Image (cartoon, coloured by chain):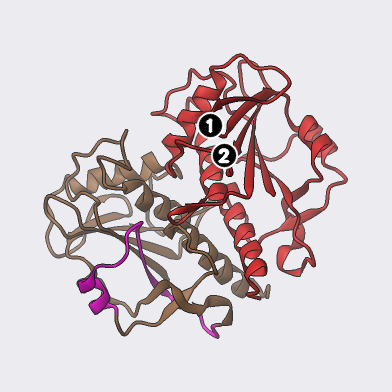
Chain colours: A brown, B red
């Protein structure tokens, strides 16, 4: 299983946001939606071996974490509005500390980065990291941030994680996921 | 200058489509919008040396071509709705055979694939092509299709183009653009 977690620093934790204003009123939810698509979609197929965690840190009740399971997800299309709609449904549920399924393959719980770091051995996608092409083994679980840098307290939490980079220029989170999955695909297929 | 052209087989050629239904009523316009974002956006910056052509082949008056210039574009954000909104404005203008600017850095004209092929030396991004990592020189101008395969008449037009591939699995057009630009970035920066 390959896992991505993306921090949404302004992303709302209630399902009342408008699908017509994902960048503004929905706290750059568009960034997170593109990460879902980059993680789970191939052309006319889905990546069944990928999971993506969205860590929502905006008002009114942060943190919350949404999980999209490539193996189980249904009713998901590649456009931003489609994943945003499933996120809205997940946030409309009462939530506790255990993942609860809102629609097939989409789950929600309270908790944020701290909980995820305790569960999986993350690497941090970071411009200052080691080039993924030079890594003998690619990390199976990667953490990315949205358009904002990590906060001081987040930096403290990830201080000891390995850091990897996908290229010389700073990319959007979804673009970095696409490049990392391409490297994974190539290694699995024997393309070098 | 790096150029991408993307064929939108169902994409409408009038600006009357709804921004709330880009995949359905707007003929998979979401695919083309993600290609604009993949082509032109870096994290907190834009790729000023990239142009992207969208070839719209849906009703009512195909073909039409929209050009987004990374060097000149303004009022563009990374979300699908933002580029779709600029496409709507471009399609609302009367158009002729020469590019006419609708908003800063966005242009529209009649004409489709035939005209573009006469203007630029394209390579075709195709799963059966040569691996880009093995190419001594990357193509400066690439043609991609949306979620549909090339038609027979399009295949005839591109029969003699070089074909390149970005990886072993079939990707969405915007994902392929991201991977190709990553390879370009790496070579420009001396990452190999």
Label 1 sits on a secondary structure element that is loop
**Horizontal and vertical percent for residue B35?**
56, 44
Nearest to N terminus: mark 2 or mark 1: 2
Task: Indicate whether B66 appears above or below B166.
Answer: above
- The residue that label 2 is drawn on is B72
In three-dimensional space, the C-alpha distance between marks 2 and 1, rounded to whole angstroms, equals 6 Å
Q: Is residue A116 visible?
A: yes
- The residue that label 1 is drawn on is B104
The answer to whether dots 2 and 1 both sit on one chain is yes
Q: Which residues are magenta?
A: A135-158
Q: Are marks 2 and 1 in contact (CB under 8 Å)?
A: yes
Task: Indicate whether A133 appears above or below B123.
Answer: below
Q: Chain of mark 1?
A: B
**Horizontal and vertical percent for residue B89?**
50, 23
Q: Is residue A43 visible?
A: no
Quarter of the figure with residue A155? bottom left
Residue at 45% of width from left, 29% of height from top? B85
Q: Which mark is residue B94?
A: none
The residue lying toward the viewer, choosing from A154 and A71, is: A154
- Decide if residue A132 is on the left or right side of residue A113: right
């Amino acid at each position: 299983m390959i896992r991505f977690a993306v921090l949404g620093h302004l992303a709302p934790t209630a399902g009342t946001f408008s699908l017509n204003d994902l960048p503004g009123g929905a706290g750059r939810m568009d960034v997170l939606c593109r990460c879902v698509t980059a993680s789970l979609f191939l052309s006319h197929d889905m990546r069944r071996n990928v999971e993506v965690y969205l860590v929502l840190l905006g008002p009114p009740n942060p943190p919350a974490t949404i999980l999209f399971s490539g193996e189980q997800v249904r009713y998901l299309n590649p456009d931003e509005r489609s994943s945003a709609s499933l996120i809205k449904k997940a946030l409309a549920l009462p939530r506790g500390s255990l993942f609860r399924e809102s629609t097939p393959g989409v789950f929600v719980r309270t908790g944020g980065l701290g909980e995820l770091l305790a569960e999986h051995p993350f690497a941090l996608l970071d411009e200052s990291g080691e080039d993924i092409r030079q890594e003998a083994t690619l990390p199976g679980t990667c953490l990315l941030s949205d358009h904002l840098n990590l906060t001081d307290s987040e930096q403290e939490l990830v201080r000891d994680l390995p850091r990897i980079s996908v290229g010389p220029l700073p990319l959007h989170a979804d673009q970095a996921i696409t490049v990392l999955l391409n490297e994974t695909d190539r290694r699995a297929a024997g393309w070098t």
